[in-house]
Image: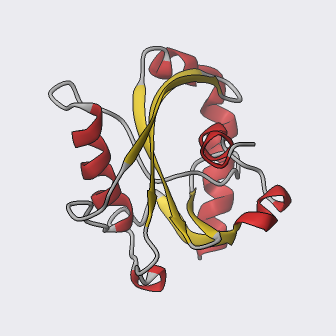
């Protein structure tokens, strides 16, 4: 069933991608790169081009970027960031495959977290939560946010 949803998501992405510029023109998002020893936690989305991504999401009008990050990470991977030390890397603009968008990027080192127990609260958005060895990242299609977080 997951593979079917992922296939449908990719098809939907390619069908609507020419129209994404209208929606994302001024969109601002947040992203968090979570490192665990020599690994990086990434997510895959059902709707997308198949790239690995970082947890995070859109900033609502009443939120600061940090408030949006805390909310989005809780929604996407059910991780509470209250006790996590975050390092802010900056505000970036990237050209996605079809759209240009802005994102605020943080990183965190969490060595004692059991990543196997993380569950998404958005099962129709997030298809997987994965830990990828840093030395194997080149084997995957990576989002710009991941490349920036790991210094690629």
Closest to the observer: 105 or 61? 105
Relative to 123, does residue 118 appear above or below in the rendering?
below
Determine the residue located farthest toward the left in the rendered image: 62
Q: Residue at x 57, y 49 (%)?
A: 47
Q: Position of residue 21 (x, y in %)?
A: 56, 18
Name the image quarter holding the C terminus.
Answer: top right
Tell me: 81 left or right of 51.
Answer: left
Relative to 42, does residue 90 appear above or below in the rendering?
above
Name the image quarter holding the N terminus.
Answer: bottom right
Determine the residue located farthest toward the right in the rendered image: 139
Image quarter of residue 93: top right
Tell me: 23 left or right of 147.
Answer: left
Q: How is the image coloured?
A: secondary structure
Q: Position of residue 130 (x, y in %)?
A: 59, 71
Q: Residue at x 63, y 56 (%)?
A: 8
Picture mark count? 0
Closest to the observer: 88 or 3? 88
Relative to 114, does residue 89 appear above or below in the rendering?
above
Image quarter of residue 137: bottom right
Tell me: 86 left or right of 151.
Answer: left
Q: Residue at x 64, y 39 (%)?
A: 148
Closest to the observer: 69 or 47? 69
Tell me: 126 left or right of 65.
Answer: right
Q: Position of residue 59 (x, y in %)?
A: 30, 32
Q: Residue at x 67, y 50 (%)?
A: 10
């Amino acid at each position: 069933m997951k593979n079917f949803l992922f296939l449908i998501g990719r098809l939907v992405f390619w069908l609507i991608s020419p129209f994404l510029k209208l929606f994302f023109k001024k969109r601002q998002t947040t992203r968090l790169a979570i490192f665990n020893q020599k690994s990086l936690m990434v997510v895959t989305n059902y709707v997308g081009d198949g790239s690995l991504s970082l947890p995070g999401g859109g900033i609502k009008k009443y939120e600061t970027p940090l408030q949006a990050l805390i909310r989005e990470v809780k929604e996407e991977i059910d991780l509470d960031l209250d006790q996590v030390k975050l390092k802010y890397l900056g505000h970036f603009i990237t050209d996605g495959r079809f759209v240009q968008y802005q994102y605020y990027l943080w990183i965190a080192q969490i060595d004692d977290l059991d990543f196997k127990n993380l569950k998404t609260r958005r099962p129709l958005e997030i298809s997987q939560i994965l830990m990828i060895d840093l030395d194997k990242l080149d084997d995957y299609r990576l989002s710009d946010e991941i490349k920036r977080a790991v210094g690629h």
